[in-house]
């Protein structure tokens, strides 16, 4: 569990670089989605200033923060399985699984326990330490809680950490999943609040925040991040990090996804993001959430080894590992193993 540092002028207990802290005065939270504690650990201006640093300075700072909190050459491996694919009623403009778009993804039923155990076993054999089960649901339905709980218990019994991403959860549902053995719940804020409505119309930002609060109060680890490369500005990328860093406490795990352009989705033709801007986002996430695992998530297949290596240098210390994300491709197990050998990275 994180212990985030509240705004303080004592730099010895702060994760902030001294010059960033000195050039911006801490101010009271004023944004509509301020942290529940009503204390901003990072202002938006400070986060924008990090993004605007010369690239080498940003990377140097991010490496410094990374080494202060983590083993320098270690990456955590999480494997993903889609336990319920497609046919989702939400209209997320990036998502191949939305029923609103014709993407060629077929809707299927919830997988049974044997299929899930087989995938978890393969992930474990390949070295994954966490197994994440995703469902194309707007929210978890009460009638599915027992079935999902049995999947979680089965994976937990295989001595893997467990993670689920099933859409919105109530507090009672979160408690039930925790009792079943769920360690992490993934629920992304996805983008900055001011552009959220341009990307998704079927739910609002507060819905996401409410679910994160339910997860936290049930005693589970929070996994929350977002997607970059959806046509947002640098300030809006900073806005996403600002929300995450000020969640009070910030998430334990922060997946940073690069948009996977999927034909049929409204965002399919979005102008590609400069890869160095993606690396900057990883670095800023590392600096502002120093004890979180920052996960280099979707988009690795399109990135190439050099950009991935820069992301690890910027402080990414977790990946989705396995040849499929939920419906789109991811590097092969062997390819990732070869990359880690080349970089001298140990996996956990
Ligand atoms: N339905 C649940 C939800 O939305 O929370 C769980 C599954 S949903 C597919 C999990 C996450 O996948 C989304 O929040 C989004 O961040 C990510 N995602 C979906 N499509 C993506 C894409 N084309 N590129 C990058 N990330 C994507
Ligand atoms: C997350 O932040 N990224 C993963 C996981 N959490 C569930 C999902 C990425 C999905 C990419 C598109 C797809 O494969 O369908
Ligand atoms: Fe549904 Fe999740 Fe995809 Fe949105 S991101 S359409 S909620 S599966």
Image: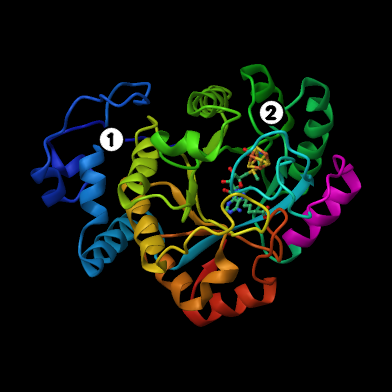
Q: Is residue 316 magenta?
A: no
Q: Quadrant of residue 241?
A: top left
* The label number, if any, that marks residue 5 in the structure image: 1
Residue 130 picture location, percent across and down = 65, 51
Residue 198 picture location, percent across and down = 49, 38
Q: Residue furthest left?
A: 22
Q: Secondary structure at mark 1?
A: loop
Q: Is residue 126 above or below residue 171?
A: below
Q: Which span of residues is magenta-colored?
A: 105-124
x 74%, y 42%: residue: 156
Around disc 2, counting alpha carbons within 10 Å, would you say few (fewer than 14), some (14 to 19), or many (20 or more)? some
Residue 187 picture location, percent across and down = 57, 37
Left or right, 329 with reference to 301: right
* The label number, if any, that marks residue 230 in the structure image: none
* The label number, if any, that marks residue 139 in the structure image: 2
Q: Is residue 60 visible?
A: yes
Q: Nearer the viewer, residue 137 or 72?
A: 137
Q: Nearer the viewer, residue 125 or 86?
A: 86
Q: Is residue 106 magenta?
A: yes
């Amino acid at each position: 569990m994180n212990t985030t540092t509240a705004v303080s002028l004592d730099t010895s207990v702060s994760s902030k670089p001294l010059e960033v802290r000195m050039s911006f005065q801490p101010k009271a939270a004023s944004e509509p989605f301020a942290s529940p504690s009503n204390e901003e650990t990072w202002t938006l201006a400070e986060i924008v200033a990090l993004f605007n640093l010369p690239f080498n300075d940003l990377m140097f700072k991010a490496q410094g923060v990374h080494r202060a909190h983590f083993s320098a050459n270690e990456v955590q491996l999480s494997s993903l399985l889609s336990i319920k694919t497609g046919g989702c009623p939400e209209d997320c403009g990036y998502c191949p699984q939305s029923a609103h778009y014709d993407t060629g993804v077929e809707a299927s039923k919830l997988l049974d326990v044997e299929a899930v155990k087989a995938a978890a076993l393969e992930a474990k054999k390949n070295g994954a330490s966490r197994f994440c089960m995703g469902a194309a649901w707007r929210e978890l339905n009460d009638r599915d809680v027992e079935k999902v709980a049995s999947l979680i218990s089965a994976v937990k019994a295989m001595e893997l950490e467990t993670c689920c991403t099933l859409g919105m959860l109530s507090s009672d549902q979160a408690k039930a999943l925790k009792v079943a053995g769920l360690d992490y719940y993934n629920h992304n804020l996805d983008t900055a609040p001011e552009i959220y409505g341009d990307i998704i119309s079927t739910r609002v930002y507060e819905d996401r925040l409410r679910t994160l609060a339910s997860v936290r109060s049930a005693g589970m680890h929070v996994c929350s991040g977002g997607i970059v490369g959806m046509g947002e500005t640098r300030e809006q990328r900073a806005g996403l990090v600002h929300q995450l860093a000020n969640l009070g406490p910030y998430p334990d795990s922060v997946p940073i996804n690069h948009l996977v352009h999927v034909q049929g989705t409204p965002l399919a033709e979005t102008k590609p993001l400069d890869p160095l801007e993606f690396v900057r986002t990883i670095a800023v996430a590392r600096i502002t959430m120093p004890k979180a695992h920052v996960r280099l998530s979707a988009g690795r297949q399109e990135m190439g080894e050099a950009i991935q290596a820069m992301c690890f240098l910027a402080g990414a210390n977790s990946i989705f590992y396995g040849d499929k994300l939920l419906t789109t491709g991811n590097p092969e197990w062997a390819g990732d193993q070869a990359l880690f050998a080349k970089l001298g990275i140990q996996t956990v």
